[in-house]
Image (cartoon, rainbow, N blue to C red):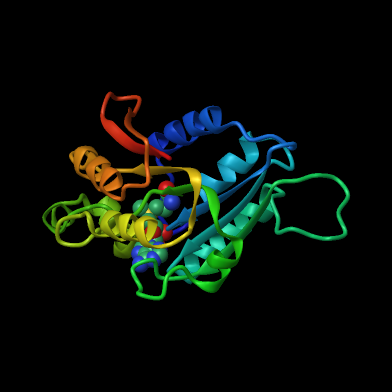
Amino acid sequence: MRPPILIPRPETEHWVTKLAETVRPSTQKPISLLDLGTGSGCIPLLLCHLWPAGSVKAHAVDISPHALSLAQENAQRTGILPHSDHEKKPRNTFTTSMANLLAEDFPDTASRSNSPFDVITSNPPYIPWKEYLELPRSVSDFEDPKALFGGPSGLEFYHAISRLISRSDLLKPDGIVALEVGHDQADTVEALMRDTGRFRRTEVWLDPWGKQRTVIAQA
Ligand SMILES: C[S@@+](CC[C@H](N)C(=O)[O-])C[C@H]1O[C@@H](n2cnc3c(N)ncnc32)[C@H](O)[C@@H]1O
């Protein structure tokens, strides 16, 4: 980890570990995963680490070149590398692309060429303007405002992700979406996912402190 990239939080590790136990891909039934706003790469890299070798191809996007360079460094350190044709042993793979997920032309070429995905994950920036101004300096001085600020209401990225899921073929028809949310956003984000019309089931997972932390939507 290093400034200005978001320091991975224990609540993120908690839901990602639960997701790893819920989805359970295998070498015989491998899956693809897209992580939006990857920062240090902690979400896809933890999943690549927890799932069996050869069971997942992960792709991650971020708008920040610093974040992507740290994510690639972390991937190298953990031995989770891009696909290579010369390799015989099955392995989980990790690739990245720089993209703005709020842009009209998202998904970018790299995300499109890896799509459709079985799993889409994101811990997007979700702090509303008013709360951003009140953040302790230990957070606002260290971490990139782009990693934290989710637009005036804090919900800008969830609206973008829900539009993306409704309008593009980024997610497989039987795919799953897992979104980390801020302390009072779960009900709104769950409704946004339901309104896409793509999911049979939605639920909210609590973090270890009993707070509503992750919206899960399953097609
Ligand atoms: C809250 S941080 C989460 C980082 C990491 N996923 C984690 O859980 O620690 C949000 C990330 O979204 C990225 N981001 C912000 N705006 C973005 C945009 N418009 N398009 C793509 N990524 C963006 C930031 O650079 C940051 O790395």
For image coordinates 43% across by 45% down, the residue present is 8
Above or below — where is 76 with respect to 188?
A: below
| Res. 143 in view | no
Above or below — where is 97 with respect to 53?
A: below
| Quarter-of-image position of residue 114 | bottom right
For image coordinates 20% across by 55% down, the residue present is 154
Q: Is residue 38 left or right of residue 104?
A: right
Quadrant where the C terminus is found in the figure: top left
| Quarter-of-image position of residue 84 | bottom right
Q: Is residue 132 left or right of residue 170?
A: left
Give the camera-side residue of 202 and 206.
Answer: 202
For image coordinates 75% across by 46% down, the residue present is 91
Q: Is residue 217 left or right of residue 135?
A: right
Q: Is residue 202 left or right of residue 133?
A: right
Image coords of residue 83 (percent x, y): 74, 58
Image coords of residue 9 (percent x, y): 40, 41
Above or below — where is 106 with respect to 49?
A: below
